Image (tube, rainbow, N blue to C red):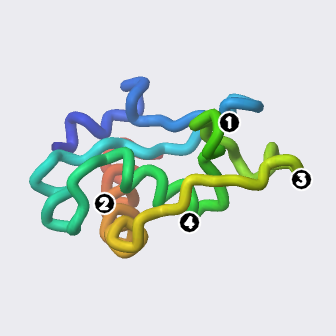
Amino acid sequence: MEKWADPKLNWSWIGCKRCKDKIYAPMPGDEMLHSWGVYAFTVLAIAHMYNLGWRVIKKTGEYVCPDCLTDQDTEFMEPVPSALEADKEYCKWIEKMKKLYNL
Protein backbone atom coordinates (compact mmCIF):
# COMPACT_ATOMS: atom_id res chain seq x y z
CA MET A 1 0.00 0.00 0.00
CA GLU A 2 3.02 2.26 -0.27
CA LYS A 3 1.66 3.79 -3.48
CA TRP A 4 -1.26 5.30 -1.53
CA ALA A 5 1.19 6.99 0.84
CA ASP A 6 2.75 9.09 -1.91
CA PRO A 7 3.02 12.63 -0.47
CA LYS A 8 2.20 14.06 -3.91
CA LEU A 9 -1.36 12.81 -3.45
CA ASN A 10 -3.78 15.21 -1.77
CA TRP A 11 -5.36 12.51 0.37
CA SER A 12 -2.02 11.85 2.09
CA TRP A 13 -2.39 15.09 4.04
CA ILE A 14 -4.80 16.42 6.68
CA GLY A 15 -5.11 20.19 6.86
CA CYS A 16 -6.12 22.58 9.59
CA LYS A 17 -9.37 24.27 8.68
CA ARG A 18 -8.18 27.56 10.12
CA CYS A 19 -4.55 28.07 9.11
CA LYS A 20 -4.15 25.41 6.40
CA ASP A 21 -1.18 23.82 8.20
CA LYS A 22 -0.89 20.16 7.18
CA ILE A 23 0.23 16.88 8.65
CA TYR A 24 1.25 13.85 6.65
CA ALA A 25 -1.39 11.20 7.35
CA PRO A 26 -1.52 8.70 4.50
CA MET A 27 -4.23 6.08 4.37
CA PRO A 28 -3.00 2.50 4.77
CA GLY A 29 -4.83 -0.38 3.15
CA ASP A 30 -7.78 -2.12 4.78
CA GLU A 31 -5.72 -5.22 5.60
CA MET A 32 -3.24 -3.12 7.52
CA LEU A 33 -5.99 -1.21 9.34
CA HIS A 34 -7.69 -4.46 10.31
CA SER A 35 -4.42 -5.98 11.54
CA TRP A 36 -4.07 -2.95 13.85
CA GLY A 37 -7.60 -3.46 15.19
CA VAL A 38 -9.45 -0.61 13.44
CA TYR A 39 -11.88 -0.83 10.57
CA ALA A 40 -12.14 2.74 9.29
CA PHE A 41 -9.39 5.17 8.47
CA THR A 42 -11.33 8.16 9.81
CA VAL A 43 -11.35 6.60 13.28
CA LEU A 44 -7.58 6.11 13.10
CA ALA A 45 -7.03 9.61 11.70
CA ILE A 46 -8.91 11.17 14.62
CA ALA A 47 -6.75 9.23 17.08
CA HIS A 48 -3.58 10.18 15.22
CA MET A 49 -4.48 13.87 15.15
CA TYR A 50 -5.41 13.73 18.83
CA ASN A 51 -2.00 12.28 19.72
CA LEU A 52 -0.37 15.15 17.79
CA GLY A 53 -2.38 17.77 19.68
CA TRP A 54 -4.88 18.39 16.90
CA ARG A 55 -8.60 18.25 17.59
CA VAL A 56 -11.75 17.57 15.62
CA ILE A 57 -14.42 20.09 16.56
CA LYS A 58 -17.55 18.12 17.37
CA LYS A 59 -20.07 20.68 16.14
CA THR A 60 -18.47 21.32 12.74
CA GLY A 61 -16.22 18.29 12.15
CA GLU A 62 -13.33 20.65 11.39
CA TYR A 63 -9.74 19.50 11.90
CA VAL A 64 -7.86 22.12 13.92
CA CYS A 65 -4.14 22.24 14.75
CA PRO A 66 -2.94 23.04 18.29
CA ASP A 67 -1.91 26.58 17.28
CA CYS A 68 -5.43 27.45 16.12
CA LEU A 69 -7.44 26.07 19.04
CA THR A 70 -9.19 28.75 21.08
CA ASP A 71 -10.87 28.90 24.47
CA GLN A 72 -14.19 28.74 22.62
CA ASP A 73 -13.33 25.29 21.26
CA THR A 74 -14.66 23.08 24.01
CA GLU A 75 -16.36 20.06 22.46
CA PHE A 76 -14.20 17.64 20.54
CA MET A 77 -14.64 14.23 18.98
CA GLU A 78 -12.93 11.79 21.31
CA PRO A 79 -10.77 9.05 19.83
CA VAL A 80 -11.81 5.44 20.16
CA PRO A 81 -9.51 3.55 22.57
CA SER A 82 -8.68 0.87 20.00
CA ALA A 83 -7.67 3.57 17.53
CA LEU A 84 -5.40 5.20 20.10
CA GLU A 85 -3.71 1.83 20.48
CA ALA A 86 -3.54 1.32 16.70
CA ASP A 87 -1.92 4.74 16.30
CA LYS A 88 1.31 3.30 17.69
CA GLU A 89 1.61 0.97 14.69
CA TYR A 90 0.34 3.66 12.34
CA CYS A 91 3.12 6.03 13.49
CA LYS A 92 5.71 3.35 12.75
CA TRP A 93 4.24 2.89 9.28
CA ILE A 94 4.21 6.67 8.69
CA GLU A 95 7.89 6.86 9.60
CA LYS A 96 8.60 4.06 7.13
CA MET A 97 6.69 5.96 4.42
CA LYS A 98 8.50 9.21 5.24
CA LYS A 99 11.81 7.43 4.69
CA LEU A 100 10.54 5.85 1.48
CA TYR A 101 9.46 9.25 0.11
CA ASN A 102 12.31 11.28 1.64
CA LEU A 103 10.06 13.50 3.75
Label located before the other in sequence (3 or 1) = 1
CB under 8 Å between callouts 2 and 4? Answer: no
Identify the residue shown where x is 65% and y is 44%.
57
**Mark 1 = which residue?**
21
* Residue 71 screen position, x and y as percent: 89, 53
Label located before the other in sequence (4 or 3) = 4
Label located before the other in sequence (3 or 2) = 3
Identify the residue shown where x is 22% and y is 67%.
36
* Residue 15 screen position, x and y as percent: 59, 34
Label located before the other in sequence (2 or 4) = 4
**Mark 4 = which residue?**
51
Distance between mark 4 and mark 1 Cα atoms: 16 Å
* Residue 41 screen position, x and y as percent: 31, 47
* Residue 88 screen position, x and y as percent: 38, 72
Amino acid of disc 1: Asp
Residue 20: quadrant of the picture: top right
Q: On the picture, is 70 further left or further right than 49? A: right
**Mark 3 = which residue?**
71
Distance between mark 4 and mark 3 Cα atoms: 19 Å
Label located before the other in sequence (2 or 1) = 1
Distance between mark 3 and mark 1 Cα atoms: 20 Å
- Mark nearer the viewer, 4 or 1: 4
Q: Which mark is residue 93?
A: 2
Q: Callout 3: helix, strand or loop?
A: loop
Q: Which mark is residue 88?
A: none
Q: Is residue 6 above or below residue 49?
A: above
Amino acid of disc 3: Asp
Distance between mark 2 and mark 1 Cα atoms: 22 Å
Query: Which residue is outermost to the right?
Result: 71
- Mark nearer the viewer, 2 or 4: 4
Q: On the picture, is 61 further left or further right than 13? A: right
Query: Which residue is outermost to the left?
Result: 31
